[in-house]
Amino acid sequence: MAETALHSSRAVDRFLNVVERAGNSLPHPTSLFASMALLILLASAVGSWLGLAVLHPATGAEVKVMNLLSIEGIHRILNGLVTNFTSFAPLGTVLVALIGIGVAEASGFIGASMRLLVLSAPARLLTPIVVFAGVMSNMASEIGYVLLVPLAGLIYLAAGRHPLVGVAAAFAGVSGGYSANLLLGTIDPLLAGLTQEAARIITPSYSVSPAASYYFMLVSTALVTIIGTFVTSKIVEPRVGPWKGERKAEDAISEISPAEKRGLKFALIAALVIIAIVLVGIIPEAGYLRQIGTGSVLHSPLLSGIVAFICLGGIVLGVAYGAGAGTIKNDRDAIKGMDQQMATMGGYLVLVFFCAQFVAFFNWSNLGLVFAVHGAELLKASGLPQIPLFLSFILLTAAVNLAMGSASAKWALMAPIFVPMFMLLGYPPETTVTAYRVGDSVTNIISPMMSYFALIIAFIQRYEPKAGMGTVIALMIPYSIAFLIGWSVLFVAWLLLGLPMGPGSPVSLPTG
């Protein structure tokens, strides 16, 4: 039995090594995105010449592939080259967040906090804590990508383990477990609204709650944490091996000094003040951090402006720690921390420029819409029964996710096709959107179209300078496969038991 398991482990390692070598044999990620952008230009010209077109599922209007090499297309490219880059969603989010993180890191606050966590937490619980924290971070949108993923690398380094293992575990929770959570997040009302509009194509009065998938996603939080921990411990960490980089783990795991303890006390006081300010603004019905007009917490600046809180919180905590520990004596020290953090992002900025052009060209060409609609038509024509149909839908969503990264944009295109189709077959919109969320999550971590994929490459290159797209995909593909299998099994069990996906969600609809 042990020999069989060892042989299986070696086979997995060989497969992942082939994936990594194949991926890293590709050009530099920047060159790759530039090449893919050029390929989209050529594909748009070919698609337009072939007359590829579909009917938009929401409007019924004909959507043709746009030739980006036409005069109109070239004008659009020239006019949009700068705005594609400056309006690329992750760019501002990352840079603003890193200003605050830079102060917190330069002051020594992050390093001292991570060492304190490692010294006080049982080593065997580190991985499940990181994966679970990644899942929960989705409640606050981008915070997991810009804060938890890089910090997890530092945490594992401080624990004497390979930092890439921490990065992988955090990324798996944040992105692979994107739809799971114990609480509702910013994506829930967005997907519910799109689902409701699609459902009203069949039933004009149909209403979909933001909590439509809550029961399923609550249970999924435990599932993702367990699977993520297993894959990290049994596949990823043995394959990566011990850390042999220049920075030694024993330097990071030193005891907390008296000056650092004083700094942490100052930071704790500052954190309590921040928490008090937030609570005063969010608990009262007329709190100043609630949404104006509705008083909603879910749509409040606390969640929609979470990046601003990360930035300001990092500055405040970093300065408070620095004042207590003596590492920040004046404004120049704080600004120096911001400068140092920005200096490390030069490669990321270049990568993002070409990544943004690729994403924009793909959207402008309408190739993504054509791909999604034709895939849906094939699935509709299959005549499959419930479980094979939904499993096929999950697989189709996972495949489309490799080409279209945005969960909301993708669902805006797919919902008008699948929600009415499944409603006519007797399947509620709540079941359909839940299946969509499973498929949308599991391939995030291996999709170059995922908005933060370039950032993950940059984080990994801090520890492995020669790492490329193949490194990330090889590192994350075991999670992707395991999440797909485990989540699909849970979904099938849910259907067989006839459980509602969320509070008030029906389990079936009349077909007569």
Image (cartoon, rainbow, N blue to C red):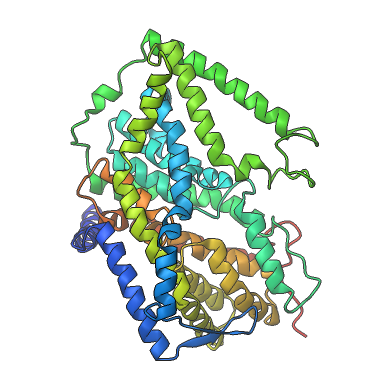
**Where is the N terminus found, in terms of image quarters?**
bottom left
| Residue closest to the far bottom | 50
Locate residue 266, reporting x and y percent: 51, 14
Locate residue 260, reporting x and y percent: 40, 14
- Image height of 418 relative to 163, above or below: below
- Residue 112 in view, yes or no: no
Locate residue 502, reporting x and y percent: 69, 58
**Where is the C terminus found, in terms of image quarters?**
bottom right
Task: Pick the residue in front: 136 or 505.
Answer: 136
Locate residue 136, reporting x and y percent: 54, 43
Q: In percent of the image, x 48 and y 29: which residue is there?
A: 314
Q: Quadrant of residue 190?
A: bottom right
Q: Quadrant of residue 329?
A: top left
**Seen in the image, is 220 located left or right of residue 165?**
right
Tally of numbered tags: 0
- Image height of 421 relative to 461, above or below: below
- Residue 368 in view, yes or no: yes
Task: Pick the residue in front: 459 or 444.
Answer: 459
- Image height of 445 relative to 375, above or below: above
Q: In percent of the image, x 41 and y 35: which residue is there?
A: 126
